Amino acid sequence: MELDDTPARLRDKPTWLISKTAARAHRLIGEAMAEIDGRAYHFAILAALDEFGPASQTRIGQRCGIDQSDMHAMLAELTDQGHVSRAPDPADRRRNLITLTRSGRKRLEKLDASLTAVQADLLAPLSAAERKRLADLLIRVLR
């Protein structure tokens, strides 16, 4: 996309710029994940389990911003691949706790490396300080 061919009224709108940047990021992430037979949702789920420990399907979905209708399929994939395990929650036997496995930790590292490379590619024009500032500003906008 050539920004010089874009009307100035659009280029001056942060919402338009955020949207175009997000579209580019999604494309790059999709390409990177395809190279390693991965999914961005898998990264989010595995990262949440790594950071917060075992949790219910509902809680993981809330932490990752993943719709519950998609969570079941994603967890089924991760379970089939051996990256997570499901077991009855001792505190509430009606629900399962999802736990990260050793294989899941290895997979998380591979996905993390791929997504880190995407960040470097997408944000290459920015210095490390600018990248940090951009992330801080976006967090403020989302709060």
Image: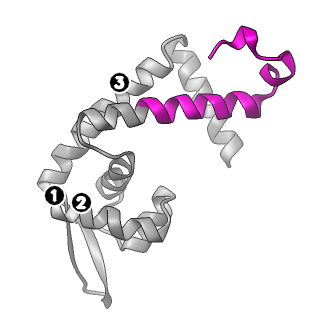
The residue identified by callout 2 is 78
Element class at badge 1: loop
Are discs 1 and 2 less than 8 Å apart at CB?
yes
Q: Does the magenta stretch include residue 96?
A: no
Q: Is residue 22 magenta?
A: yes
> What secondary structure do most residues of the magenta stretch adopt?
helix
Q: In which quarter of the image is the N terminus?
A: top right
Residue at 46% x, 70% y: name it: 68
Left or right? Give the position of 70 relative to 127: left
The amino acid type, in three-letter code, at marker 3 is Ala
Q: Which mark is residue 81?
A: 1
Q: Mark 1 belongs to which amino acid?
A: Gln
Q: Real-space Cα distance between discs 3 and 1?
A: 24 Å
Tell me the number on the disc at residue 117: 3
Residue type, label 2:
Leu
Say which residue appears at 78% left-offset and 20% top-offset: 11
- Locate residue 100, reporting x and y percent: 22, 60
The residue range painted magenta reads 1-28
